[in-house]
Amino acid sequence: MYSVIVVQRDGRLAAQVTTDAAGPGAVPLGGIDTGLGGAATAPVTGWALAGVVLVLIGAGAVARTRARR
């Protein structure tokens, strides 16, 4: 892959061709190691558990209030 760069030398513009990538490219064998790709499970933290408990308590309170009507 080549790039053409325009540079200024002695008050004049000049084009300079540079090589970005040289040599034969190696084709990778197999997949790229990127972890579990979203299949990993995150550990349940105390904050997440507390949030679920609060949502359940709130849902129970709403249900009790509607049942009394």
Image: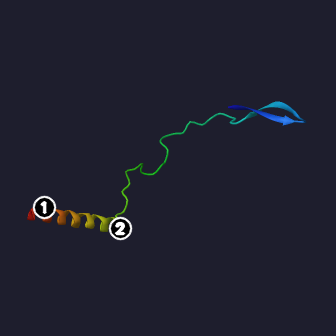
Q: Are the residues tagged 1 and 2 within 8 Å (C-beta)? A: no
Relative placement, left or right, of 67 versus 43 is left
The vertical placement of 39 against 27, above or below, is below
Q: Which residue is mark 1?
A: 66
Task: Please identify the quarter of the rendering in which residue 12 is found.
Answer: top right
Q: Residue 27, image x and y in percent?
A: 56, 36
Query: In what element is the residue under mark 1?
Result: helix
Q: Residue at x 22, y 67 (%)?
A: 57
Relative placement, left or right, of 43 versus 57 is right
Task: Give the Cα distance between marks 1 and 2.
Answer: 29 Å
Residue 47 shows which numbered tag? Answer: 2
Query: In what element is the residue under mark 2?
Result: helix
Q: Residue at x 23, y 65 (%)?
A: 58
- The foreground one among 67 and 43 is 67
- The foreground one among 52 and 35 is 52
Q: Quadrant of the N terminus?
A: top right
- The foreground one among 53 and 17 is 53
Q: Residues within 10 Å of mark 2 (few under 14, many from 20)?
A: few
Q: Earlier in the sequence, mark 1 or mark 2?
A: 2
Q: Residue at x 34, y 69 (%)?
A: 46
Mark 1 residue type: Arg
Q: Quadrant of the C terminus?
A: bottom left
Relative placement, left or right, of 40 versus 1 is left
Q: Residue 48, image x and y in percent?
A: 33, 64
Mark in the foreground, 1 or 2:
1
